[in-house]
Amino acid sequence: MTDGYPERQTSPGPAGPGPDRARLLLGGGLAVALLAVIGASGGWIIAGGDPGPADRPVAAATTAPAPTEATPATDAPRTTPPVTRTTARTTPAGGLTVPALVGVDFEDARRQLHERKLGWRLVFGAGAGRNVERTSPEPGTPVRRGVTVTLWVAGPAPAVAVPDLVGDDCAAAADDLVEAGLYPRYRTGRRGTVTAQDPAARAPARWNDPVALVCGDPPSTTPDGPPPTP
């Protein structure tokens, strides 16, 4: 039995999809295919298929530098070390220093100073003994030649006899007095021959006592006036 549509028939068994449902499925498939084509085309355009105008501005991505803390300014390294005050003594050329004379016999101490071309001054005390108690400058002090070193001696000045100097050269006589512990005083100059001395030869004296010298040409033994007529 038909219902007016010859293409529509029934058949035993489970009902299959009719013509309308088939057309719906076919139309849906076409729609899906069309959307796929449009999506692919859009993806190609987005991916760069259409480069667009040549003068289109391009935005360049830049990364801002990370903020850094300001480094405080520091002073330039010094090329010259700071001056430091010191009390260290400067040794003069040659390394000359005051020798260690404390406890030494004053005559030996005087000899050591003389060998170093240093002067000396003896100051005798009221105690006992001939040893040096202290010096000025102190031992080890850098000094230059000719500097006078004062020696403090424990005991009093020893006794000494005045040497005989009359007839000697004035300079040689002065050296002899110093060697004996005495000091020359000049009344008429330092040149010539010693014609007189005070105290006299072999007079008692003590170390550091002065001796006055009269130096000059020896007196002439020739009488004044013309020689006698024979």
Image (spheres, rainbow, N blue to C red):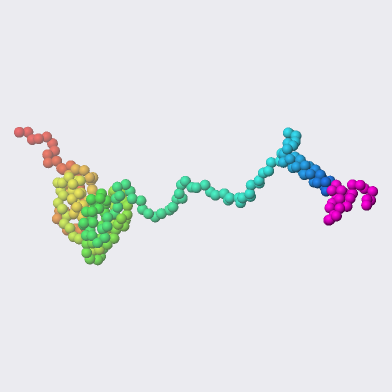
Residue 209 seen in this snapshot: no
Identity of the residue furthest to the left in this view: 230
Magenta stretch in the rendered image: 1-24
Q: Is residue 81 left or right of residue 218?
A: right
Residue shown at 23%/63% (left/top)?
155
Q: Give the x, y percent position of residue 44.
A: 74, 40
- Where is residue 180? Give x, y as percent: 18, 54
Magenta span: predominant SS is: loop
Image height of 207 relative to 45, above or below: below
Specify whether 75 is left or right of 103: right
When the figure is inspected, residue 130 is found, relative to residue 228, above or below; the finding is below
Q: Is residue 19 magenta?
A: yes
Image quarter where the C terminus lies is top left
Confirm whether the magenta stretch covers residue 182.
no
Q: Nearer the viewer, residue 122 or 138?
A: 138
* In-front residue for pair 79/214: 79
The residue lying at 29 percent from left, 47 percent from top is: 94
- Up-down relation of residue 193 to residue 228 (above or below): below
In front here: 48 or 113?
48
Residue 162 percent coordinates (x, y) = 17, 55
Q: Residue at x 18, y 42 (%)?
A: 217
In the image, what residue occupies the spot 61% across and 50% down? 68
Q: Residue furthest right?
A: 4
Residue 41 position by quadrant: top right
